[in-house]
Structures are given as C-alpha cells and as structure tokens.
C-alpha cells in the first residue's frame, strides 16, 4: 500500500474510528507482528507456541492503532513495535515460562561479571567466570545462551528489589530539566562501552540492534551457530550493563 493511501486511511480512522477502517490498518501493519516475534530469542524455545506470541502481538498492534496520534510526528512503526513487544512479553510473563532457578543463575552471572570486571580492571574470560561461579565451562556456555532469552524485558518488570525501567527512564512528558542531559550522558557511556567490545561482539550488536537481523541470520553471515551468536550477544550485553551500572549504580538498566 502506498504511503499516501496509508496516510489517507489514518485520517479517515481518526475522524471516524469504525471497525472497517481499523481492519485495513491492522492488515497493513500485520507484518510488524511477525517481525517482532522473529527477533525475540524466546521464539526459539520449544515450550513456546509461536501462534500464541503472534496473537498477543496482534492485540498490541490493535492497541497501538487505537492510541496512536499521527499529529505527534512519530513513525507509527516505531511506536507500534514497542507496543507489540510489550504485549508479547506480558504474555510470556503470564505463562511464567522462565524457571526460578534460571533467573537466579542469570542474576548470579551478571553480579559475577560485574564483580570480576571491577576486580580485574578488564573484561573477564569465560574461564574466569566459570571458576568464580563454581561451574564448569560447558555449563557457563549453556547459561550464556539461556540468558539471551531473558534479555528482553518489559518496562514494568522488576528483578529482586531493583527499580523497573519505567521508574528509571523519565517520561517524555515529565518536566525534568536534567532528563536530556542524563540521556546524552547515557549515550556517551554506551558509545565508549561498545568500543571496548571485541570486534566480533560489536558486529553482533550492530547487526542485531541496528540492522534488525535475527540471531540465526547473524550466524549465517559470520559462519557461526545460532547458539554461539547467543553467547556472544549475552557477553556483549553483560559488558554494556556493567558499564551503565558502574556509572549510575542502577540495579537493572538494560
């Protein structure tokens, strides 16, 4: 559908939000749901039904259509993707698909990584991580893969006694004179932290977050297995989190 036609449908819907016009918008933007599902690492888990994720994503898409304001000059796709992600993650949380034992291991991994990084003054190796955690190297590799499934969190999710992202990230409508400065400082820290990553880690982060490729697609490009890409992705995210936490002392930022 051409851009001009879509804009015309939006104008019609905002003037007269009837089901027929709404359905046209849903059908047009439906590929966004599949896009989000394909990029979620949890879609690879055998215990998760992809159809259920898609159904939840469609609910998020419909909510996005109903609440979107074209006059705010924000691309609908950008706005809708966050809504779709939130709806899918809420569905996953309601299923309680992550075992408590895995959450505990993931928290321990992150704390151990941060502690070793401070102690060594550099990025810890897998051998050092495994030894400090008291586990075998192959167990660490498995945990790095599983941690990928926990890396996508909704804005209101909390870990232990930490604050949620919604409480940490200021609202765009909030009258906070320091919010813009804080966001810029965060970006600067992330830029420096990304430069500290290995070339392979930077490539994975770039392809996943900036080129919108899935872990499987990245694996094909780099000639590595999807599980290996998951490990590289997790180590990169651990590093970025540790840098942000060291600066702001947040318990959970990413």
Image (cartoon, rainbow, N blue to C red):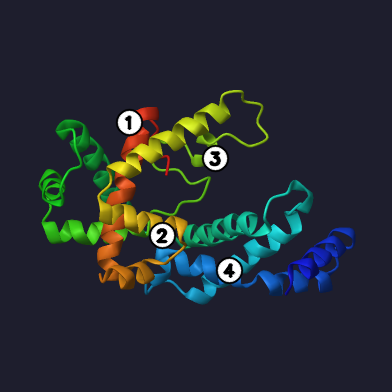
The answer to whether one can see residue 102 in this image is no
> Which residue is the site of mark 1?
246
> Which residue is the site of mark 3?
166
The residue at the point 44 percent across, 56 percent down is 209
Whether 153 is drawn above or below 111: the answer is below
Residue 112 at x, y = what percent? Answer: 21, 41
The residue at the point 24 percent across, 47 percent down is 109
Q: For the residue labelled by badge 2, is the local secondary structure a helix, a strand or a loop?
A: helix
**Position of residue 215 in the picture relative to residue 16 (left or right):** left
Q: Nearer the viewer, mark 3 or mark 4?
A: 4
Q: Nearer the viewer, mark 3 or mark 2?
A: 2
Q: Nearer the viewer, mark 3 or mark 1?
A: 1
Residue 160 at x, y = what percent? Answer: 38, 40
Q: Which mark is residue 33?
A: 4
The mark nearer the N terminus, 3 or 4, is 4
3 and 4 marks in contact (CB < 8 Å): no
The residue at the point 15 percent across, 51 percent down is 126
Whether 110 is drawn above or below 145: the answer is above
Whether 90 is drawn above or below 223: the answer is above
Nearest to the observer: residue 45 or residue 102: 45
């Amino acid at each position: 559908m051409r851009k001009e036609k879509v804009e015309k449908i939006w104008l019609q819907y905002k003037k007269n939000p009837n089901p027929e016009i709404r359905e046209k918008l849903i059908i047009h933007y439906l590929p966004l749901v599949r896009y989000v599902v394909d990029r979620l690492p949890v879609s690879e888990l055998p215990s998760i039904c992809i159809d259920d994720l898609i159904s939840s994503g469609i609910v998020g898409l419909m909510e996005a259509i109903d609440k979107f304001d074209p006059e705010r000059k924000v691309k609908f796709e950008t706005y809708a993707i966050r809504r779709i992600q939130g709806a899918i993650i809420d569905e996953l949380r309601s299923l309680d698909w992550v075992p408590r034992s895995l959450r505990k291991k993931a928290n321990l991994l992150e704390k151990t990584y941060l502690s070793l990084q401070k102690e060594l003054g550099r990025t810890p190796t897998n051998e050092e991580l495994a030894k400090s955690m008291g586990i075998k190297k192959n167990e660490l590799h498995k945990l790095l893969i599983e941690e990928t499934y926990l890396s996508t969190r909704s804005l209101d999710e909390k870990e232990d006694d930490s604050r949620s992202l919604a409480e940490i990230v200021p609202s765009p409508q909030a009258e906070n004179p320091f919010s813009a400065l804080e966001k810029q400082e965060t970006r600067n820290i992330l830029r420096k932290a990304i430069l500290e990553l290995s070339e392979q880690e930077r490539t994975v982060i770039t392809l996943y977050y900036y080129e919108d490729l899935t872990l499987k697609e990245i694996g094909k490009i780099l000639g590595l297995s999807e599980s290996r890409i998951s490990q590289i992705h997790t180590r990169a995210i651990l590093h970025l989190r540790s840098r942000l936490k060291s600066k702001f002392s947040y318990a959970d930022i990413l």
